[in-house]
Image (spheres, coloured by chain):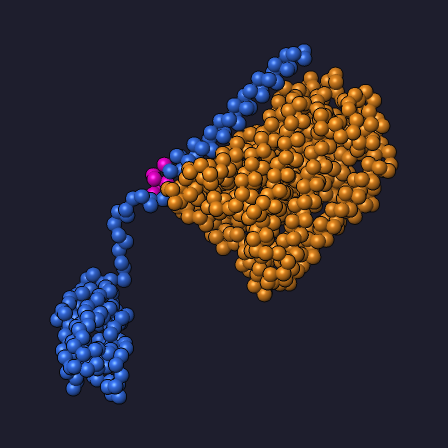
Amino acid sequence: MNRSAIADANRQTLRRLLAVSALMFGFGFALVPFYDKICEVSGARNVFKPDQAPPANTQVDQSRRVTVEFDANTQRLAWSFRPLEAHVAIHPGALTEVVYEIRNTLDRPVTGQAVPSYGPPDALQYFRKLECFCFRQQTLAAGEVRRMPVVFVIDPKLPKEINTITLSYTFFEVAGSKDTSG
Amino acid sequence: MTSVQTHHGDHAHHPAGVMRWVTTTNHKDIGTLYLWFSFAMFIVGGIMALVIRAELFQPGMQIVQPEFFNQMTTLHGLIMVFGAIMPAFVGFANWQIPMMIGAADMAFPRMNNWSFWLLPAAAVLLVSSMFVPGGAAGTGWTLYAPLTVQMGPGMDLTIFAVHILGMSSILGSINIITTVLNLRAPGMSLMRMPMFCWTWLITAYLLIAVMPVLAGAVTMTLTDRHFGTSFFSAAGGGDPVLYQHIFWFFGHPEVYIIAIPAFGVISQVIPAFARKPLFGYGSMVYATASIAILSFIVWAHHMYTVGMPITGQLYFMYATMLIAVPTGVKVFNWVATMWRGSLSFETPMLFALGFLFLFTLGGFSGLILSLTAVDVQVHDTYYVVAHFHYVMVAGALFAAFAGVYFWLPKWTGRMYDERLGKAHFWLTLVFFNMTFFVQHFLGLAGMPRRIPDYALQFTEFNQISSIGAFGFGLSQLLFLYVVLKTIRSGDRAAQRPWEGADSLEWTHLPTPAPYHSFETPPLVK
C-alpha cells in the first residue's frame, strides 16, 4: 500500500470509531428509559403505583372472634365513668382502641387512678395494653369531662375456651392529693 | 531519557527544549510523556493515600477533618485510576505498539499529541478542585448520586476533568486501534502479533465502548446540578440507583481496561525470562477477548446491596463467576510458559512473578466477593479495599514496573542497576502485603471503608497497614532513583539485553531504539 492509501484507510477507521464513540454516548442516555421500563416490567421500583393488595397481617388470627366487654366503676368517688362502647368483637392479634369517658361532678379538682381487673382471671396474661389511662393518675378540674383511650392486643395464643373477656376498671381517689390542683 | 535520545538522535529533527515535548508527534516522545505524567500522578495520588493512612494510624480524629478525608479517598481513587495506571499503559502502548508491529509511528501522530496534552489539563482541574469553596468532591471515586448532586463547585471541576480524561482516552484508543489494524508490517498477521498488541487492541475497544457511557453519566449529573433535569434526583422523579447502573456499566469494563494491558506486559516478560514462547498464544487471545466481552454483562455485582430482584442477583453472580474461567486460562498459560523453561530472575521477571501470585490472590478474593450472600456481609468494608488493591496495585502497577524494567534498556540504551531493581522489588512486595493483606482481616471484622475513624479493636491491624503504606510509598522513591540513575549513568545496554525476548523491537532495531524506527516496514517471516 502506498502512503495515501494508508492515510485513506486510517481516516475511514477513524470515522467508524468516532461513530462508535458517539453511539455509546447515546447508549448511556438510552439506559435511562430502558431502566425505567425494566423497573416497570419487573416491579422493582413501583413508587408511582399503589400496591395491589395491602400485605396481610399474619399476626392476626382471622379464624376466631373474641368478645371483650368493658365495665366501669368508681369507688367512693363522685365521678361518672363509662365506656363509649359496652363491648366489641375482635380477632385475637388485632390492635384495638376503645374510649372511656369520665366526668368530674364535684366542684373541686380531684385526682384519681383506675385499677383494671379481668374476667376470667386467666385472660390476664393474654391481654396486652399498649396505652391506657390507668397507667397514670388523672386529675380533673371541677366539672371537667375527659375522653381517654385504651389500646390493646389480645395474644393469639389465648386458649380456645375463652370466648369472652371482661375488662373492668375501678376508679379510686388518690389519697392525699385533695389539695393539689393539677 | 532526553539526553540519551539527543545523543543518539541520528536523523532526529525536532525543536529543542520544552517545545520539543509540547509539539512532538513522535510516538516515543509521547510515550515518554505519558510515563512521566503517570509517575507524577502516582506520587500525587500516593501522597493522598498516605494522608488517609496517617489519619487511620490511630482511632479517633488526629490529622484531618472528615470532609477532607472524604476528598482524599475520592481524589486518590480518581487520580490513581485515570491519572496513574491508565496513562502508564497508554505510555507503554505508544512506545511499544509501533515498534512491535513494525510501524513507523502511530496512525494519527498529531491526535496522539493532543490526547496526551489533554491529560495535564484534566489533572490541574482535579487537583485545583481542592481549593474551591467546599473543597473537592468527597463522594468516593464512583461519584454516586445523590451526593454528587449536593456537592459544591469542586464537583463541577471533577465532572469536567472526567470529560477531558474520557476524551483523551477515546482519542488514544482510536489511535491504537487504527495503528494495529492498518499499520502492521507485511507478514504480521493479527494472530502473529505480540500478545501486548492484542491486549491493547481489546482494551482500546473496551475504552471506546465505555468511556462515552461514563461521559454520559457525569453529563447527567451536571445537568441535574445546574439545568433542572432529574435523572438521579429523587425529588424530581429520578432514581439514584440508575446512576449506579450506568456508572458500573462503565466501571466494570474499566477494571479490565486497567488489567488487560497488564496481562499484555506480563505475557511479554514471562516468555522472555523463561526463554520459551508464550504457551497457548491462541487461547490467550480468546481468553482476553472473552474477559472483555463478559465484562459488559456483570456490572451489577458491584451493587448487590442496593436492592435487586433475587433473579438479578443470581444472574450477576453466575456471570461474574464465569469470568474466572478465561482468567484461569491466562494464569495457567503463564505458569505453563514457565514450566521447564530456562528461568532467570531479573527484576522484570520478579515483578511478573509477584504479579502472578498476588493478582491471582486478588482474583480469588474477587471470586469470594462475587457471591451475593458473602458480598452483602463485606460490601463497603476493607475486604473490598484489600481485594481491589491486590488487582490494581499488585496487578496493574507490578506489571507496569515489570514493563519499565523490561524495556528501559531498549528505551534508553542503558541498563538499570540490577541490585537496586531487586531491592525495589522486594521492598515493594513486602510493604505491599504489609499494607493490604491485613485489610482483609479488618474487612471481615467489619471495618467500613471511606470512614476516617474506627472502633478500638481495629487499631493494631490499621497500624500495621499504615506503616506498610509509608514503607511502600518511600520504596517508590527508590524506583525513581533507579530510573534516573539508569538514564544518567547506567551501563551501556547490550544489543539484546534479554536473549529470550523475540519481538521486533529486540530483533530488528538497535538499542537504544532510534528516534525514527521502521520507516520502511520490516518483512515478518
Question: Is there any visible trace of residue B214 in the rendered image?
Answer: yes
Question: Horizontal placement of A31 versus B496: left or right?
Answer: left
Q: Is residue B93 positioned above or below B315 on the image?
A: above
Residue A20 in percent (x, y) is at 52, 25
Q: Is residue A107 positioned above or below B88 on the image?
A: below
Q: Is residue A38 part of the magenta span, yes or no?
A: yes
Question: Horizontal placement of B134 versus B90: left or right?
Answer: left
Closer to the camera in the image, A146 or B352: A146
Closer to the camera in the image, B58 or A16: B58
Q: Quadrant of residue A144?
A: bottom left
Q: Quadrant of residue B230?
A: top left
Q: Which residues are magenta?
A: A37-43
Residue B287 in percent (x, y) is at 58, 34
Question: Horizontal placement of A43 versus B68: left or right?
Answer: left
In the image, the chain rendered in orange is B
Q: Is residue A22 part of the magenta span, yes or no?
A: no
